[in-house]
Image (cartoon, rainbow, N blue to C red):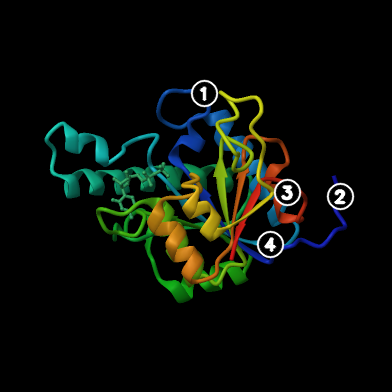
Amino acid sequence: MSETRTPAYQRILLKLSGEALMGDDSYGINRETIEQIVTQIQEVLAFGVQIAIVIGGGNIFRGVAPTAAGMDRATADYMGMLATVMNALALKDAMSRRGMSARVQSALTMQQIAEPYIRSKALQYLEDGKVVIFAAGTGNPFFTTDTAAALRGMEMNVDVMLKATKVDGVYTDDPKKNPEATRYQKLTFDEAIIKNLKVMDATALALCRDQKLNIKVFSIFKEGGLRRVVLGDDEGTLVHC
Ligand code: UDP
């Protein structure tokens, strides 16, 4: 489909959770799901939008759970960060097979499989139209990939943070349980914090608020969802200053 409209954003940070890659499976990476996500990314890349991605690892490993089983929290978190690297490589591979140009930069050095995170290089890749996938979160235990997304989004000077979820925005209540629940079209950061709405984790939300980086929560599972968000259509929920 040809699109003549101008995108609302020139450079975006897309936060994909590990769960987003699982599809309906109970763990791991679902081939069809990753292909569907890549299709959406390809659509917006075609508008000339620069795309940076932070990928989670929850589909493979979540650091907090093993702590309860007696594992050292920092060690568990490093394992979680390694899981994000696997997802990043899978995503890059799926993009490369479509002829898209993508680079993985990791916050933990593992030079045989990914470049280290170098801000200036990442910015250059974006300028060149390459998709940059940031792996290994912040590189520090006790953080999340939501926080990594806020950090990299600010470092990359993106116009907006796009938080991809399974639900198409932030709702007044759980739409699966309450049919009366309605979607917020817009919310201020303060409203989201006061109402304790699950937008991103608290550290990420505070960082975005302080640095005035707006967040759009939307569903990556809705066909064309990412395209509509990038074109500025009424899709998802905008969390703004
Ligand atoms: N993690 C970490 N530091 C970071 C990012 C991630 O220690 O900066 C670990 C943490 O254990 C987390 C796991 O990696 O549980 C996977 O990341 P996250 O839970 O954010 O993934 P998502 O929920 O987005 O799939």
Which of disc 3 and disc 4 is earlier in sequence? 4
On residue 2, which mark appears? Answer: 2
Q: CA distance from mark 2 to mark 1?
A: 31 Å
Instruction: Determine whether label 3 and label 1 are within 8 Å by CB.
Output: no
Which of disc 2 and disc 3 is earlier in sequence? 2
Q: Which residue is mark 4?
A: 49
At x 18% / y 34%, what residue is drawn?
68
Instruction: Determine whether label 3 and label 2 are within 8 Å by CB.
Output: no
Q: CA distance from mark 1 to mark 4?
A: 29 Å
Q: Nearer the viewer, residue 74 or 21?
A: 74
Task: Name the residue at the front extreme.
Answer: 194
Q: Which quadrant would the N terminus be assigned to in this image? A: top right
Instruction: Determine whether label 1 and label 4 are within 8 Å by CB.
Output: no
At x 38% / y 58%, what residue is drawn?
203
Q: Nearer the viewer, residue 154 or 41?
A: 154
On residue 227, which mark appears? Answer: 3
Which of disc 1 and disc 3 is earlier in sequence? 1
